Image (tube, rainbow, N blue to C red):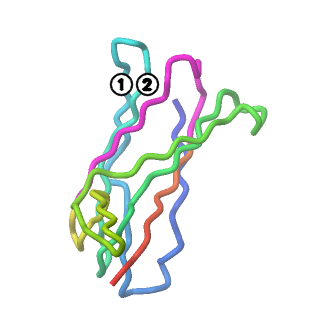
Amino acid sequence: LKNNIEEHTLNNNYPNSAKIILMGDFIEEQDNNYNTILSGQVKNIGKKRADFVKINFTIYKDKQTQSSSTNFTVFINGETREFENNIISNSSLSENSIGAFSVIIPSDFGPFTSYTYTIDWEQYD
């Protein structure tokens, strides 16, 4: 399986911002129902807390056409924070913190040839 890496560049020009990177490689497993599980860890190597950290996967069924792709998004399992309006999230990462994630690609999606990913986050003071 080919793993294409897209570098997240949104906050790279701000040295005092959060910056989330993938640690190591994805772990690819199958469960008892033949679903594919992609999991791994991310780390905040920036100077600020990152909130609502998520990973967006685009899974490609073949190399020929974009129309045979599907998107999957999963929030990381990180630190719990309470925001305005009583919103509580467990997908924040403080400076130097690590969070885990796993996304399930259902078996009825069928075999796939490759995937790309982006890491996305927001920042609140």
Closer-to-camera residue (84/50): 84
Query: Which element is circle 1 on?
Result: strand
Sequence order check: which comes first, mark 1 or mark 2? 1
Pick whichever, 96 or 109, lies toward us: 109
**Kind of residue at badge 2:** Thr
Q: Is residue 5 left or right of residue 89?
A: right
Q: Residue placed at 27% from the left, 66% from the top?
A: 93
- Please give the name of the residue rendered at 59% of the width and 36% of the height, measured from the top-left corner: 59
Asked whether residue 112 is drawn in magenta, I would say yes
User: In the drawing, what numbered circle is on residue 29?
Assistant: 1
- Residue toward you, 86 or 79: 86
Q: Are marks 1 and 2 in contact (CB under 8 Å)?
A: yes
Percent coordinates x, y for residue 49 in the rendering: 29, 75
Q: Position of residue 85 (x, y in %)?
A: 36, 72
Q: Is residue 44 above or below residue 119?
A: below
Q: Secondary structure at mark 2?
A: strand
The magenta segment: 98-115
Quarter placement of the C terminus = bottom left
Cα distance in 3D space between marks 1 and 2 = 6 Å
Q: Tell me if residue 25 is in the magenta stretch.
A: no
**Which residue appears at 31% of the width and 58% of the height?**
91
Q: Residue 94 lies in what quarter of the image?
A: bottom left
**Vertical placement of residue 2 versus 89, above or below:** above
> Could you classify mark 2 by the number of other residues whose Cα lies within 10 Å: few (under 14), some (14-19), or many (20 or more)?
some
Q: Going by the picture, which residue comes out furthest to the front?
A: 85
> Disc 2 marks which residue?
36
Q: Is residue 121 above or below residue 14?
A: above
Q: Amino acid at mark 1?
A: Glu
